[in-house]
Amino acid sequence: GPLSERRLMDVRLGELPTWLVTCDFSPQGLLGGVRRAWSSYYNKYINVKRGGPAGISMLLAGYCLLSYSWNYQHIKRHRWRKYH
């Protein structure tokens, strides 16, 4: 199919700059991409017939890593503070 309709995993490395130019980076386009990614994740890991805790635990682990990276500078400064 056309390059603009391919998913990221189907694009070859040499075609990546051309594919990026054809992407829609407007707020509505980015929101649609996030919506498609969430529905893909939900259908693959959470909405399965015999699912386990893997989908939810991956989501929680991602949230923990993201919140730690957001607070890293504060944690780093707090670590060097002396307690007398």
Image (cartoon, rainbow, N blue to C red):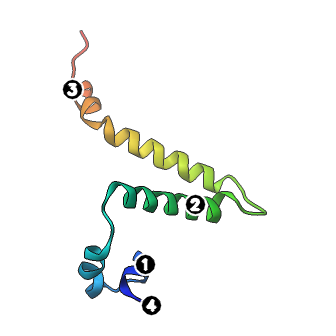
Q: Where does residue 49 sit, x and y in percent of width and height? A: 78, 63
Indicate the secondary structure of the residue bearing disc 4: loop
Tag on residue 9? 1
Q: Is residue 72 left or right of residue 5?
A: left
Indicate the secondary structure of the residue bearing disc 2: helix
Residue on which the image places disc 4:
1
Amino acid under label 1? Met
Amino acid under label 2? Ser
Q: In which quarter of the image is the N terminus?
A: bottom left
Q: Where does residue 72 sit, x and y in percent of width and height? A: 29, 37
Q: Please tell me whether residue 25 is drawn above or below residue 67 in the rendered image.
A: below
Q: Quadrant of the C terminus?
A: top left
Q: Residues within 10 Å of mark 2 (few under 14, many from 20)?
A: few
Tag on residue 80? 3
**Which residue is nearer to you in this view: 34 or 81?**
34
Q: Which of marks 2 and 3 is nearer the N terminus?
A: 2
Q: Is residue 48 left or right of residue 63?
A: right
Q: Is residue 70 left or right of residue 73?
A: right
Mark pair 2, 1: CA separation: 17 Å
Q: In this view, does 83 lie to the left or right of 59?
A: left
Q: Which residue is drawn at 59% across and 49% down?
A: 57
Q: Residues within 10 Å of mark 4 (few under 14, many from 20)?
A: few
Q: Residue furthest bottom?
A: 1
Mark pair 4, 2: CA separation: 23 Å
Amino acid under label 4? Gly
Disc 3 versus disc 1: nearer the observer: 1
Q: Please tell me whether residue 6 is drawn above or below residue 82 in the rendered image.
A: below
Q: Residue at x 40, y 75 (%)?
A: 8
Mark pair 4, 3: CA separation: 56 Å
Disc 4 versus disc 3: nearer the observer: 4
